[in-house]
Amino acid sequence: MSQSTSALSHDVQLTPHQGGLLSRSFLGVLLAQFLGTINDNVFRWFIVFVGGRTWDNEAQALSLGLFCFTLPYLLFVTMAGYLGDRFSKQKVIVFLKFLELPLMLLGIAGILMRNVPFLFFVVALTGCQCALFGPAKFGALPEVLRPDKLSAGNGVMGFATVIGTALGLVIAGILDDKSKINLADTVSLGQVKSEAIFLVTLAIIGWFCTLMI
């Protein structure tokens, strides 16, 4: 009896960080996911718009963008699960969110280089980052939420993902309509200033949010 009581006490001591939907750790995961979803979709759709205009083939750019972003989910599903189990989920989340910043900078560089294939390669890299991020993100929820709040937390995360996806498409359209970049022509940094500021800023804010976990 004393052993079971001791074990129960030990379990409670291992999870003092579990809280509700307004807990610091859950908000960190939620904001990182929400901002990352917006950023990934803004970048992907912006590249699709630019690629379609440059190639004068919107359907081809749309298909390639979808392929590059979703293929990593099929290729890295096993590795993503391994990372979430092998290492601290918090550390995996922080590291993967940090990678978002150099990926966005690579995308801006690709636009300035006027290299459409390279841009879609970067889209594939962002797909890899998202694929690896998923299991760690959902695996962290039982560790930061009380059991009675887990279902609600999953629902909030799903809702944030849907809203972030929709917002990403809308914002990408607004940015593209403003710049109208065609990589067949010369592109200056000033033409992509708004996109660069937006993508880099959201990546940095998203990374800082992971430090709340």
Image (spheres, rainbow, N blue to C red):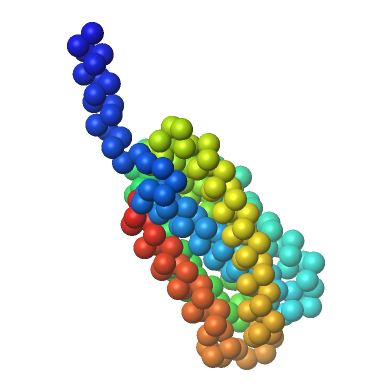
Report the residue at 72% width, 80% height from top: 54
Q: Is residue 28 left or right of residue 125?
A: left
Relative vertical location of residue 42 with respect to residue 50 in this rendering, above or below: above
Residue 99 in the image: state x and y as whole percent. 43, 62
Residue 17 in the image: state x and y as whole percent. 31, 41
Q: Is residue 128 visible?
A: no
Relative vertical location of residue 171 with respect to residue 83 in this rendering, above or below: below
Residue 199 in the image: state x and y as whole percent. 51, 72
> Closer to the camera, 117 or 151?
151
Residue 6 in the image: state x and y as whole percent. 21, 18
> Closer to the camera, 146 or 141?
146
Report the residue at 74% width, 79% height from top: 53
> Closer to the camera, 199 or 188?
199
Relative vertical location of residue 78 with respect to residue 56 in this rendering, above or below: above
Location of residue 68 by image quarter: bottom right
Relative vertical location of residue 161 with respect to residue 54 in this rendering, above or below: above
Report the residue at 79% width, 73% height from top: 57
